[in-house]
């Protein structure tokens, strides 16, 4: 009996030691990466490692290009290197510190290679994706691994290499500068008009309350979930009035976030398609804004914002694509359905009167990194306004 009890005690202690050893096994050794198909089915905001083949660069919800990559900001993975269905791909947002090593514009040879990406499983481009990426690794037989990025990037480092973005515009003025800026910001990723709702909730988020957005003309902080068409809801204001060029809500100018802003429904209705100018009667709900039969004057705090949005539109849309209008600024009001917006002389004054602020810069960065992948040059370089229009 004593011997049996001793064997039993020894056996139980062995089990305890085994359990202890298992509990001390590093998670990194025990963990395995998910396949792309597994990651597609688990978009639950968990942090996971996902292994797949690079099949191209996503530029829209259902578009993945396989060459002539426009930038280094995203890539698509699939379980097969020959996959062509976007439904079987996961979209990866590449953070700034990994772009030089794993961006497809810099390294088109990565197409067809197997990568392991660690990040948060969440939607990107309104498609199953991986964001907040912490690491990317590649092992290719017979070659050296891709260079390791900076493992601890400076948190104060700009998330967007702004000067590099505009390098081809350096030294240019007048029409040459306007043309080059157009070439730089052209061919951006286009959103659907319904997708604009969710995008504005991020681009115009109230920094003091993440549940709210700031309305353009009133300056009011309002709950994100109160968007719609009812009284005191907020809706999507086309700062370049969509009737000026008759582009409506078509993808491209009609959905371009650089001139779409959340505004109070009734205030938006009053502004309508008016051109911009000084003077008029103060709006009873949007104090500081003035209007008359042919013009709208926004509050002082956003005069420069409005001007720079219109300068952007006049450069981005030059009519060089068959379905895009040629938008231009002029010194008139009552432009109606013509592809013109005024009043240029006043917009130039507003650009100087209301300088670029941090909220405007943040909005530009969010549109660039998360949605359209192009920038408003006149937020980054407001001095270029006078180089082109004066």
Image (tube, grey):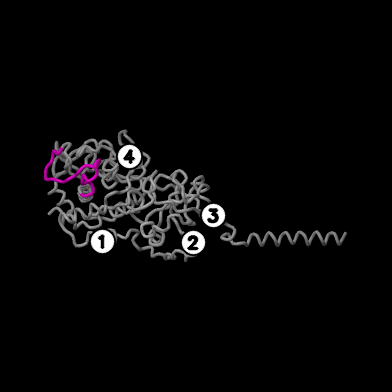
| Residue 213 in which image quadrant | top left
- Percent x, y for residue 248? 25, 37
Element class at badge 3? loop
In the image, residue 49 lies at what x, y percent?
51, 55
CB contact under 8 Å: marks 1 and 4 = no
**Front position among marks 4 and 2:** 2
* Residue position for label 2: 140
* Residue 267 on image: x %, y %: 24, 38
Task: Please provide the residue range marked out in magenta.
Answer: 315-335
* Residue, disc 4: 193
Q: Which residue carries the number 1 mark? A: 167
Q: In the rendered image, which residue does mark 3 sit on?
A: 33
Q: CA distance from mark 2 to mark 1?
A: 33 Å
Which of the two residues, 136 or 225, is positioned nearer the viewer here?
A: 136
Q: Secondary structure at mark 2?
A: loop
User: Earlier along the polypeptide chain: callout 4 or callout 2?
Assistant: 2
Instruction: Residue at 49%, 50% (x, y): give it.
Output: 80
Q: Find the distance from the CA under tag 3 to the CA under tag 2.
A: 17 Å
Gap in angstroms between the C-alphas marked 1 and 3: 39 Å
**Number of the front mark, 4 or 3:** 3
Q: Are marks 2 and 1 in contact (CB under 8 Å)?
A: no
Identify which residue is drawn at 71% across, 60% down. 16
147 up-or-down from 236: above or below: below
């Amino acid at each position: 009996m004593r011997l049996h009890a001793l064997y039993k005690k020894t056996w139980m202690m062995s089990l305890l030691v085994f359990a202890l050893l298992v509990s001390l096994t590093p998670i990194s050794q025990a963990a395995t990466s998910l396949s792309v198909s597994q990651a597609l089915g688990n978009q639950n905001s968990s942090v996971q490692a996902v292994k797949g083949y690079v099949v191209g660069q996503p530029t829209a919800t259902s578009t993945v290009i396989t060459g002539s990559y426009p930038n280094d900001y995203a890539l698509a993975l699939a379980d097969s290197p020959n996959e062509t269905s976007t439904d079987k791909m996961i979209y990866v947002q590449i953070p700034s510190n990994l772009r030089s090593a794993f961006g497809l514009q810099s390294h088109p040879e990565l197409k067809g290679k197997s990568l392991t990406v660690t990040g948060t499983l969440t939607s990107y481009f309104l498609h199953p994706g991986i964001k907040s990426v912490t690491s990317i690794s590649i092992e290719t037989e017979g070659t050296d691994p891709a260079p390791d990025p900076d493992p601890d990037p400076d948190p104060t480092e700009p998330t967007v290499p702004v000067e590099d973005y505009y390098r081809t515009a350096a030294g240019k003025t007048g029409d040459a500068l306007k043309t080059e800026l157009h070439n730089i910001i052209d061919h951006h990723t286009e959103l659907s008009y319904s997708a604009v709702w969710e995008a504005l909730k991020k681009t115009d988020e109230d920094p003091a309350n993440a549940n709210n957005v700031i309305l353009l003309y009133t300056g009011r902080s309002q709950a994100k979930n109160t968007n719609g068409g009812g009284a005191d809801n907020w809706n999507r204001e086309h700062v370049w009035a969509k009737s000026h060029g008759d582009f409506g809500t078509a993808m491209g100018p009609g959905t371009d976030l650089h001139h779409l802003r959340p505004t109070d429904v009734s205030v938006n209705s009053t502004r309508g398609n008016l051109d911009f100018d000084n003077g008029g009667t103060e709006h009873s709900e949007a104090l500081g804004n003035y209007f008359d039969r042919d013009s709208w004057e926004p509050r002082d705090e956003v005069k420069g914002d409005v001007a720079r949005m219109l300068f952007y539109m006049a450069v981005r849309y030059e009519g060089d694509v068959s379905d895009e209008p040629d938008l231009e600024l002029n010194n008139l009001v009552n432009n109606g359905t013509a592809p013109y917006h005024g009043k240029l002389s006043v917009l130039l004054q507003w650009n100087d009167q209301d300088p670029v602020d941090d909220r405007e810069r943040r909005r530009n960065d969010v549109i660039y990194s998360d949605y359209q992948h192009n920038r408003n040059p006149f937020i980054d370089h407001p001095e270029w306004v006078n180089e082109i229009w004066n």
